[in-house]
Amino acid sequence: MDGKARVAVLVSGGGTNLQALIDAQRSGLIEKGEIVLVISNRESAFAIERAKKAGIETCVVTRKACGGQEGFEAKVMELIDSHDIDLVVLAGFLTILSAAFVRHYEHRIINIHPSLIPAFCGDGFYGIIPHQAALERGVKVTGATVHYVNEVADGGEIIAQKAVSVEDDDTPETLQRRVMEQAEWLILPVAVAKICRRIVKERS
Ligand code: GRF
């Protein structure tokens, strides 16, 4: 335990946000936290490769293998609890978690969302979609938000946000990349570092 908060990261895709967390841990930014487990709901997620390369324990948990949502969540909860996890980070995790699951880990799950909540968020707004919606609406500024996860999709307490300009020639893809580079990959590690410090302080 060596006095650090134990962090589990849940992923589904490329894992660039996970990579930002791994890099921040290496650089000492996340001084009071340690990523000890990465869980993916997709076998093919490149995030798993990133975790393995960093020497972090990984586990793939699929609804199919667990016989449905209930079994899936039970397995994820078992992994979280057996690893004494203090903080769960959803980083590009594209599976809805039930209200029961979220309540069980109240104020211990955070998520990175690719917009300035309350804009372009909630059911159906994930991945590239928030960026498509931002361009369709014609906003000049968008960004990313780190928030606690509660029963309402993207409805939890906001922890951090960072604004990013929208350029006239942006496509959803170029905008997504800029939001990731200039917002997500910066505010998520800082938020995790801050929360881990609080957890360790409260424990001492
Ligand atoms: C990104 O669009 C991010 O905003 C969202 O999930 C997508 C993939 O992230 N949270 P990652 O590269 O798997 O971290």
Image: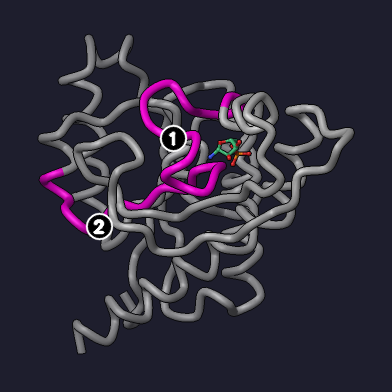
Q: Residues within 10 Å of mark 2 (few under 14, many from 20)?
A: some
Mark nearest the camera among 2 and 1 is: 1
Q: For the point 64% across and 52% down, which residue is it?
A: 19
Magenta span: predominant SS is loop
User: In the rendered view of the protein, which quadrant contains the N terminus?
Assistant: bottom left
Measuring from the top left, give residue 51's x and y in whole percent: 57, 46
Gap in angstroms between the C-alphas marked 2 and 1: 21 Å
Q: Is residue 4 magenta?
A: no
78 w.r.t. 27: above or below: above
Task: Report whether the residue tagged 1 is closer than 8 Å to ligand 1.
Answer: no
Residue drawn at x 19%, y 50% is 81
Q: Secondary structure at mark 2?
A: loop
| Quadrant assignment, res 198 | bottom left
Crowding at label 1, few (<14), some or many (≥20) Cα neighbours within 10 Å? some
Ligand 1 sits in quadrant: top right
Q: Which residue matches tag 1? A: 121
Report which quarter residue 101 is drawn in.
top left
Which residues fall within the magenta stretch? 103-129
The residue at 46%/67% (across/down) is 191
Looking at numbered disc 2 in the image, what kind of residue is underneath it? Arg
Q: In the rendering, which numbered label is found on residue 146? A: none
Hey, what amino acid is under mark 1? Cys
Q: Is residue 68 above or below residue 47?
A: above
Instruction: Name which of mark 2 and mark 1 comes first in the sequence.
Output: 2
Q: Position of residue 11 (x, y in %)?
A: 48, 37
Quarter of the image for residue 124 reads: top left
**Which residue in the protein does label 2 denote?**
108
| Residue 125 forms part of the magenta stretch | yes
